[in-house]
Image (cartoon, rainbow, N blue to C red):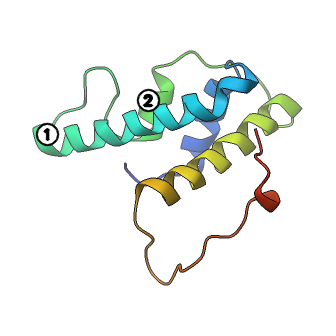
Amino acid sequence: MRAVLDGDLMALARVVMLWPDEQRPDQLQRLLDQVHAADLYCKRFRRAHPHWGNGSVLSMALGLPRAKAGPGDPRYLRALGCVCAGMAAWRLTRQPLKRNDEMPLPLFAGKPMC
């Protein structure tokens, strides 16, 4: 997966807002797997994946329905928290730790954010 920027997280949060609360964690992990697969596809074939984009979260999010909400909307902030927690979980389970990261920081004492 390409580097994730704040714009990626904000666009994805607007996608997640449309998902039912109970389905968010699983759908988010599946979507992040697709983004990663699109990045591998793009690197191998030197073109964007026909359905999943170029391997950036933003390219995937822009191809999906998104909610319209202001940055102070509590539903948006909740979805943004879910996206951040989901991204951290995806990184910890799908990729080896880098640099000197020996132990991940706990997110809200083990309680899911979404």
In the picture shown, does residue 1 fall above or below 105? above
Residue in the picture at 30% in, 38% down? 37
Looking at this view, is 97 or 41 the one in front? 97
Q: Earlier in the sequence, mark 2 or mark 1?
A: 1
Residue furthest to the bottom in view is 100
For residue 47, side relative to residue 15 (left or right):
left
Q: Helix, strand, or loop for circle 2?
A: helix
In the picture shown, does residue 25 fall above or below 100? above
**Residue 70 picture location, percent across and down:** 80, 29
Say which residue label 1 marks: 46
Q: Helix, strand, or loop for circle 1?
A: loop
For residue 5, side relative to residue 50 (left or right):
right
For residue 19, side relative to residue 34 (left or right):
right
Looking at this view, is 64 or 101 the one in front? 101
- Circle 1 packing at 10 Å, graded few (<14), some (14-19), many (20+), is few
Looking at this view, is 42 or 68 the one in front? 42
For residue 67, side relative to residue 101 (left or right):
right
